[in-house]
Amino acid sequence: MKNLKFSRSDLWIWMILTCISLPAQLRGQTMDEMWDNRSTEQESNNVQWFKDAKFGLFIHWGLYSHLAGEWNGKRYYGSGEWIMNQAKIPVKLYEEAARSFNPVNFNAEEWAQLAKDAGIKYVVITAKHHEGFAMYDSKVSTFDIVDATPYKKDPMKALATAVGKQGIPFGFYYSQFQDWHDPNGGKNTWDFDETKKDYQKYYQEKAIPQLKELMTNYGPLGIVWFDTPGGLTKEETQRFVDGLRKLQPKSLFSSRVGHGLGDYKDYGDSEMPAQPIAGAWESIYTHNDSWGYIKHDLNFKTPDVIIHLLAEAASKGGNLMLNVGPDGTGRIPEYSVQFLRETGKWLKQNGESIYGSTQGLIPQQPWGVSTSKPGKQFLHVWNRPLNGKLLVPEMDVHVTKVYALAGGEAVKWEKSGKDIVIELPIFAPNAINTVFVVEYTGASPRYDEQAPVTISSQFAANNIYAASAQTEGNARIESLTYSHYYGDWKHTTCVVGMKDSKTDQAIFHVRVTEPGDYQVVLEYACEPGSANQEGVLQVEDKAFFFRTLRTSNFDKKYPLPFIKHTVATLTFDHAGSYQLKIKPLTGKEELFKLKAVLVKPVAR
Ligand code: H79
């Protein structure tokens, strides 16, 4: 996937990834209906600000935040905004919960200030999630924060104003099809008979009128973020979009409006594409395991994880929108506040390498990732090579200057063939992400998606991910989707389908920078039926045999554990190119689902 247009195959990958992240029953439309063929030239002309923004803040806030993952004294795990569905709470009882929802600690200015401090460039908040509760003053339904709670104010009004004052584009999430409160809304099967539902009536009488309120009463919107489409044909969706566009001609619509429409693409929940992707796109992750507040979910991503995710998305040409879940009193969890501010501190010094950048010119390296701007390549270094010499492979450009982005200190470098080798200054070995800038003149090198993966003894481990495999026969690369608790999706790209010993194999092209002894570890998932089969790793004329170790069945409702199976110690006797070939010998069942090949130097 090069930096050209959306090719047919990009769209397929996008389509498959998005579809597998939403179960069929929620998709409400077939895969064929999902996407049309577009190119970046057909992009909405107002998409550039979004491509430059790189870092968005998602906020899930609703009546579910007040329930906080508990119902009838029982704790629920997974996605907190799904509690009504998970506990099958009847509409009448759910309505009662609103009577004690009083977010008196909500302070719009504080939230907007936090967004500013964190270096956020757009904010999207849930105006109505699947539960059907409007977090704003709606005249369409009384199931809203003004009519149904003691709070009686419209927090969306205050937030739109406060975020706008900070100069940050503001947007609404609106669940356009699912509505568990409305007899005709999608997916409440415990109160309402699905066969008696009239989705058209729901769109005409609730979703469209509410969207019109949101798109009329809250000033100019940057984004309208839809989710889980259903109940409309492609033509109907087009009319829905066209009608709403008239109210906010400049607002972007997310791709989850369905049927391939929308102005930019959203990947599945908590999903990062494996390779750079052209066009405008966004990866969405939540700060802990839930989108909506859960009292007992304290599994917050640390600042280094956030900063690496942000740099990784930018290195592939896209945005990260990170979600926080304020509680029922209106407070953003303390760790979210703290870790967002840490991210903001890093961005204050290093923002130039993120905002307005485009994908890196070279693939991920053992030291980190890269982003670029005309005449500049930013190196995001979070693994320091032992000898302090940073290899930037295949950067065949006329270098004018290399320096640390924070502080601007010049650093020594030399050209070695097509590579650049940078003499790193001393910096804290646990630094989250130290950015170096390579300034150059002349044409930029073309991103080579077939570039070999660097294997170096300067790093404790070199990870060769499945996405870089060349696959033969029935072997193919797939993004596998599964969850831990409930709707908290995880995605891992694997080589799957290797079965036939004559035809099927995965080939990894690597470049070894220091000869020597290395250990090879295969990281894979292996279903019981696949266990105990023989496979072979071939490197040049040497064969290293192994037998697969059983892990578990693959079921999207459960975790998919991967085993790290050390299969061989081998010697690369010269520096340079090698191929690591992995194939089955038994030929009964799929060998395994291969996530990565880890190559570890024996002596460092
Ligand atoms: O708002 C967040 C999620 O609530 C929303 N998207 C993000 C941004 C979302 N809506 N639907 N989905 C995600 C897919 C959810 C699938 C599920 Fe399930 C169905 C979760 C619970 C029921 C599959 C079946 C997983 C657990 C049971």
Image: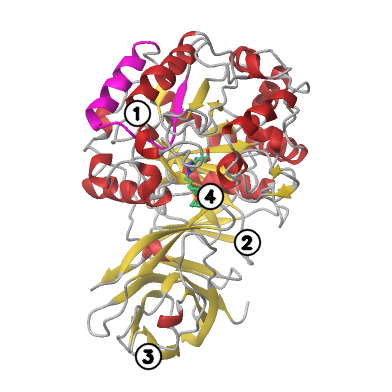
Expressed as whole percent of the image width and height from the top left, the position of residue 479 reads 40, 58
Secondary structure under the numbered disc 3 in the rendered image: strand
Chain-order first, disc 4 or disc 2: 2
Q: Secondary structure at mark 4?
A: loop
Residues shaded magenta: 222-247
What kind of element bears circle 2? loop
Residue highlighted by disc 3: 542
Q: CA distance from mark 2 to mark 3?
A: 33 Å
Q: If you read the primary sequence from the N terminus, does the residue marked by circle 1 or circle 4 appear first?
A: 1
Q: Count residues near mark 4 (Cα–Cα under 10 Å), then give few for <14, some for 14-19, many for 20+.
A: many
Whether residue 228 appears in magenta in the rendering, the answer is yes
Q: Tell me the amino acid under the disc marked 1.
A: Asp
Residue 278 position, x and y percent, is 34, 41
Determine which of the numbered discs, if any, sits on residue 198 in the image. Answer: 1
The amino acid type found where label 4 is placed reads Gly
Q: At 56% from the left edge and 73% from the top edge, which residue is drawn?
A: 457
